[in-house]
């Protein structure tokens, strides 16, 4: 809109100096925010001795040992026994033998990671499904006690979810939902659905009813109009909401520690349990954390356009 | 094409009665214009016919079929909204094709293409078909919205101030175009506007609404020349009809109960007369005509005058009425 007159002095558009200052602030903030992430990544490619050396090493010889330790279980053997084995079949085997150990089998990291994926994406999908339909109903229909119901839905977020951890723990034990993926999906959905309803209602309120009404007059049923007209226009809002839900479910730690221990354990409670010989295996922990960041990163980068448009909450909508 | 019949239809939103006891017949093949100010119930009436609102009382028939409780889709009507009706996520082509792709009455794609192109040609948006709907100007958007109604051959076209967001030149063009399309296709059209030029030029019949009631229904000429009350009389005419106290024209033969005399600007003859009771207060030059503002006692009347008339501000004038209308204390028309 204002692009055509960008050479003119606009009182709304920032000038070149303010732009530069803003950019500098953003860059500094990004650098500060990136330090822990960079540290985690660097630790993940250090050897265990390098990872705990003091002063910390910034220059070091990178090693895949952390990643190998993350994915394997190992046992210590005598040099004589190791000499009797055939030559190492892969990088990890070789690194392990340098430490006088052999790979016994895979670790639990991969299945825990899969649990995290299933539970986080499953609960996000369910939250969005319930949230979209509920938000549409609240936005378009005369729901009795609508304001009270909306407040009730919001009120479920007014205390920290972990406050009800003990009752949920007992309920889940009775219902046989402890340490099941279904149980965790339901739990995270229950927490996220209030956020989803409120965010999505805002987005759907912004879509003029005339769109659906036009479709309904043109021969579509309400449900068809919902799918053909409302959903495409709510897409940015749905994506933004989905990212919020996913981030919560992906990062959730407290309930996961409490309610999962084996079958359905997610990655967050698993990562701190990675123990090496004589203490925490920091490179393996860092490797687990680094890989754990990847899905959210990919999801967010892929959908960043929708996310950016979405979190302005329709303010710049035409 | 079909006739639309509303009998005793009422609709209330909370405390406001948008439509009350409305009886209206829009004849088959007629261009019926609903005229009234904001809040008169025009849009609600259209929405009731479309099925977007359910009446609290009364029946609605389309083509002889009682559709009072029918959902919008099976009523087979087309609706042009005042705004907002283009889907921003679709191209112009897909917007126009949208009604033809409705699951209820889906056409083969080839037929859809033919219809869409024909309508786009008619509305001169043929070169815009590939654009996204949001890349159009306001006028183009509204033409697409009208086009989306025209691609179908519904029982009734319903249009809610479809031209109000257009500039005056395009509005005048589309007015003629819509009227031509309606005449050529013999479509039944129910059209809402508060623009009297649209009402006068396009309507077969005009229905004047006041606070949810139909005050008068008739041919444009009748509404203009023969209004039933002051409300209808003031709806048409620009500048509006002069309503003056009966006492200002004691010499006019009027029914005994007359309180107000209504006289249109073109029905006043003005003559310079030093003994006249009027005084020219202001002259508006509009090129082909002049509007004289004449003060008469404490009232002002507007008179349509020849631009060459040798009159100046401050001149004393006498006014002569031709075919004045007489209204009683309640605003209703009195006849001899």
Image (cartoon, rainbow, N blue to C red):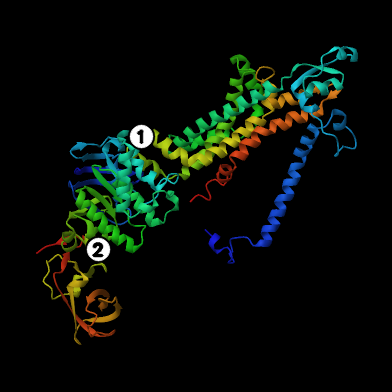
User: Vertical placement of B128 versus A117: above or below?
Assistant: below
Q: Could you tell me which residue is drawn at 29 percent across and 75 percent down?
A: B286
Disc number for residue B234: 2
Along the viewing direction, whichever of A224 and B248 lies nearer the viewer: A224
* Image spot of residue A263 (x, y percent): 66, 17
Dot 1, crowdedness within 10 Å: few (<14), some or many (≥20)? many
- Which quadrant does the C terminus of chain B fall into? bottom left
Q: Could you tell me which residue is drawn at 69 percent across and 28 percent down?
A: A253
Asked if residue A251 can be seen in this view, the reply is yes
**Secondary element type, mark 1:** loop
Q: Could you tell me which residue is drawn at 69 percent across and 22 percent down?
A: A110
**Secondary element type, mark 2:** helix
Q: Chain of mark 1?
A: A
Dot 2, crowdedness within 10 Å: few (<14), some or many (≥20)? some
- Which quadrant does the N terminus of chain B fall into? top left
* Residues at marks 2 and 1, CA–CA distance in whole angstroms: 42 Å
Looking at the image, residue B97 sits to the left or right of residue B324; the answer is: right
* Image spot of residue B318 (x, y percent): 19, 81
Disc number for residue A221: 1
């Amino acid at each position: 809109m204002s692009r055509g007159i960008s050479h003119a002095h606009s009182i709304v558009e920032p000038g070149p100096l303010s732009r530069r200052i803003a950019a500098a602030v953003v860059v500094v903030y990004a650098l500060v925010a990136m330090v822990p992430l960079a540290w985690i990544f660097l630790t993940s490619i250090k050897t265990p001795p390098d990872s705990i050396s003091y002063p910390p090493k910034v220059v070091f010889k990178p090693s895949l040992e952390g990643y190998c330790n993350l994915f394997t279980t190992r046992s210590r053997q005598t040099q004589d026994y190791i000499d009797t084995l055939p030559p190492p079949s892969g990088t990890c085997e070789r690194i392990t033998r340098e430490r006088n150990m052999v790979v016994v089998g895979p670790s639990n990291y991969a299945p825990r990671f899969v649990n995290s994926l299933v539970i986080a994406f499953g609960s996000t999908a369910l939250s969005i499904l319930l949230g979209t339909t509920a938000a549409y109903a609240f936005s378009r229909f005369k729901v009795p006690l609508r304001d009270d119901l909306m407040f009730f839905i919001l009120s479920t977020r007014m205390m920290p979810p972990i406050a009800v951890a003990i009752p949920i723990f007992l309920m889940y034990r009775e219902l046989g939902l402890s340490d099941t993926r279904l149980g965790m999906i339901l739990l995270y959905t229950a927490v996220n659905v209030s956020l989803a309803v409120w965010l999505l209602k805002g987005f759907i309120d912004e879509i003029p009813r005339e769109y659906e009404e036009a479709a309904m007059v043109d021969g579509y049923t309400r449900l068809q109009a919902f799918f053909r007209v409302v959903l495409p226009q709510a897409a940015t809002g749905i994506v933004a909401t989905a990212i919020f839900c996913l981030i919560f479910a992906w990062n959730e730690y407290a309930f996961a520690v409490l309610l999962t221990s084996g079958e359905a354990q997610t990655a967050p409670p698993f990562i701190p349990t990675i123990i090496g010989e004589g203490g925490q295996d920091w490179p393996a922990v860092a490797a687990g954390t680094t890989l754990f960041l990847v899905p959210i990163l990919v999801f967010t980068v892929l959908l960043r356009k929708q996310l950016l448009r979405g979190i302005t909450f329709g303010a710049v909508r035409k | 094409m079909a006739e639309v019949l509303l009998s005793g239809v009422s609709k209330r939103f909370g405390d406001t009665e948008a439509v009350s006891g409305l009886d209206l017949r829009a004849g088959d093949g007629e261009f019926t214009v609903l005229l009234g100010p904001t809040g008169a119930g025009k849009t609600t009436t259209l929405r009731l016919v479309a099925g977007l609102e359910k009446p609290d009382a009364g029946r609605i028939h389309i083509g002889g079929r009682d559709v009072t409780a029918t959902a919008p889709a099976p009523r087979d009507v087309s609706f042009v909204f005042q705004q907002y009706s283009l889907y921003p996520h679709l191209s112009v082509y897909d917007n126009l094709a949208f009604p033809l792709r409705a699951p209820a009455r889906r056409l083969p794609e080839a037929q859809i293409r033919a219809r869409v192109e024909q309508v786009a040609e008619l509305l001169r948006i043929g070169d815009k078909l590939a654009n996204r709907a949001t890349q159009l100007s306001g006028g183009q958007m509204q033409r697409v919205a009208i086009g989306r109604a025209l691609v179908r051959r519904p029982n009734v076209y319903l249009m809610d101030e479809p031209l109000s967001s257009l500039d005056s030149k395009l509005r005048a063009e589309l007015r003629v175009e819509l009227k031509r399309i309606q005449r050529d296709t013999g479509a039944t059209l129910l059209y809402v506007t508060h623009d009297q030029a649209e009402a006068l030029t396009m309507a077969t019949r005009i229905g004047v609404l006041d606070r949810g009631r139909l005050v008068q229904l008739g041919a444009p000429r009748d509404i203009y020349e023969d209004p039933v009350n002051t409300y209808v009389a003031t709806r048409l005419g620009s500048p509006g009809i002069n309503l003056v106290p009966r006492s200002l024209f004691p010499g006019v033969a009027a029914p005994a109960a007359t309180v107000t005399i209504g006289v249109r600007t073109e029905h006043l003859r003005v003559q310079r007369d030093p003994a006249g009771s009027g005084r020219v207060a202001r002259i508006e030059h509009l090129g082909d005509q002049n509007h004289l503002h004449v003060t008469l006692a404490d009232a002002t009347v507007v008179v349509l005058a020849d631009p060459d008339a040798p009159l100046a501000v401050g001149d004393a004038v006498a006014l002569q009425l031709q075919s004045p209308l007489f209204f009683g204390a309640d605003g209703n028309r009195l006849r001899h």
